[in-house]
Image: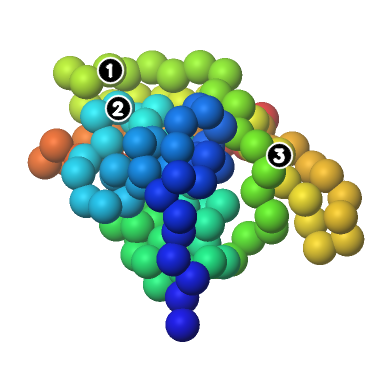
Amino acid sequence: MAQSIENDLRCPCGTGDTYAECCGRFHAGPAAPTAEALMRSRYCAYALLGRDPQRFGAYLHATWDPATRPALAEPGPEWMRLQILGASGGPFDDAATVEFVALYRDDDGARHRMHELSRFRRESGRWLYIDGDVR
Ligand SMILES: [Zn+2]
C-alpha cells in the first residue's frame, strides 16, 4: 500500500514552503501557472516517485508532451536538490524554457549534478514538458 505524503512536509523542490502549499497543489489537479512551477512540480514528483509510483508516475505522464513521453516514468536516483537557474515564459506565454541544476545521489552514494535546459509548451491552459538539452 502506498505511503501517504504528509502535507506539512517541506516541499522537495526547495522553495521552503510546505508540500501542500507548493507542488502538492498542482499534484492535486489545478494547472501550474508557469513552466517554472510545472518544472518544480515535476522534479517534486520524481523526488516522491518511490513513495507512490502510481500517483506520481501518472502526474509525470500527464505533464509530458504526448509526442515525446515514454510509456512509463522510470524510477530514478535519489533526488536531493533543485536549483532553477533561469526561466523564460510567463502566465501569458505558450512556450517556455527552464534551465536548472538537479543534484542526486546514485545507489553507491556518489553525488552527481544534472544541468538541463528544458523546453515546455502550453496546450489548453496546461504546461507540458517537451524535452531538454543536457548542458
Ligand atoms: Zn514544490
Residue 132 visible in the picture: no
Reading the image, the residue beneath label 2 is: 34
Mark 3: amino acid: Leu
Numbered tag placed on residue 59 in the rendering: none
Which residue appears at 65% of the width and 37% of the height?
Answer: 81
Residue 18, placed above or below residue 15: below
> Of all residues shown, which one is farthest toward the bottom?
1
Reading the image, the residue beneath label 3 is: 103
In the drawing, does residue 93 fall left or right of residue 120? left
Among the two numbered marks 2 and 1 on one chain, the one whose residue lies closer to the N terminus: 2
Pointer 2 with pointer 1, Cβ within 8 A:
yes
Residue 17, given in percent of the width and then of the height, sits at 46, 31
Q: Element at badge 2?
A: loop
Front residue of 130/49: it is 49
Mark 2: amino acid: Thr
Which residue appears at 88% of the width and 61% of the height?
Answer: 108
